[in-house]
Image (spheres, grey):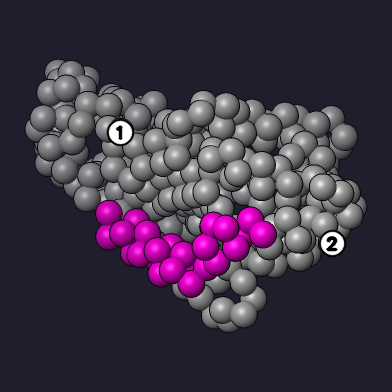
Amino acid sequence: MGTIYGDWLKQQREAAGLTQQELAERAIMTRSHIAHIEAGRRVPSNEDAQRLDRALDTGNVLSSFLPQEDAATADYFEAVRVLEQQAVMIREFALAYFPGILQTERYARVILGSAFPPVSEEECDRRVVTRLERAKILENPVIPTVWVLLDEVVLRRPVGSADIMAEQIMHIVLLAESGRIRVHVMPFAVGLHPLMQSMLTLMWFEDQPPLAYTEGERMGKLHDSPSVVHELQSRYDLALSDALPLKESLALLRATAKDYGHDD
């Protein structure tokens, strides 16, 4: 849907005889934001769409053309995957699985191989490669800054063998101890917390407004509305305030890996 919307916006802009920079100035947006929308990498918020309609004198055509709230995960996740590569800061909350950008190959293969309806071995291989490609953003030693908040259930529910779990947990530990990521665990003892309904990814950019992505069973949503993104950021901050500090989180991760059979 993002690409279709972007094509439509480009047609309207060119019909009005405007460059991306000229439209950006009229709509009080950045040129790069316009470029990302036209390329299908971003879906504008309602506020942005309304500004674009006013700038292009298109009534409410662009705002009414926005994707509906119940759009499926697949319609948004390709844009999320691209945006991950552009982010300068990413904050993840994991409710069931370790976040995709932090998964080891064996852990990812178990997750992706358990899809229903089942997928072929070739399709599983393709998905694993795609997931590992996402993790390459961590090869840059500085950008993006990555914070990870893990519900304790992510550590306790075995995925695959004990060896796979130990390897996955130690992968997180080594990334955190090297300073590449920051990790915190939300312990069971906290009980209810503000992020229990779904996983959450928050992303910040150099030249675009921040956004959020939430995902549940067969449902995902890319949030671009400033008020919604701010609310989700606040929920993350509240949950983080109840999580274990970094040092204690690393100790728990190491102890859990040891329980799975990891030998220091």
Picture layout, residue 25 above or below residue 222: above
Residue 238: give x, y in percent of width and height: 41, 69
Q: Is residue 91 left or right of residue 153?
A: left
Q: According to the image, label 1 marks what residue?
A: 206
Mark 2 closeness class: few <14, some 14–19, many ≥20 residues within 10 Å: some
Q: How many marks?
A: 2
Instruction: Find the magenta span and give its range.
Output: 226-251
Give the quadrant of residue 135. Answer: top right
Q: Is residue 34 left or right of residue 139?
A: left
Of the two numbered discs 1 and 2 on the same chain, state the one appearing first in sequence: 1
Q: Which one is in front, 9 or 252?
A: 252
Q: Residue at x 63, y 56 (%)?
A: 250
Q: Which one is in front, 166 or 15?
A: 166
What element does badge 1 sit on? Answer: loop
- Queried whether the magenta region covers residue 238, the answer comes back as yes
Residue 27: give x, y in percent of width and height: 14, 37
Q: Main secondary structure of the magenta part?
A: helix
Q: Residue at x 41, y 41 (%)?
A: 89
Residue 17: give x, y in percent of width and height: 14, 18
Q: According to the image, label 2 marks what residue?
A: 259
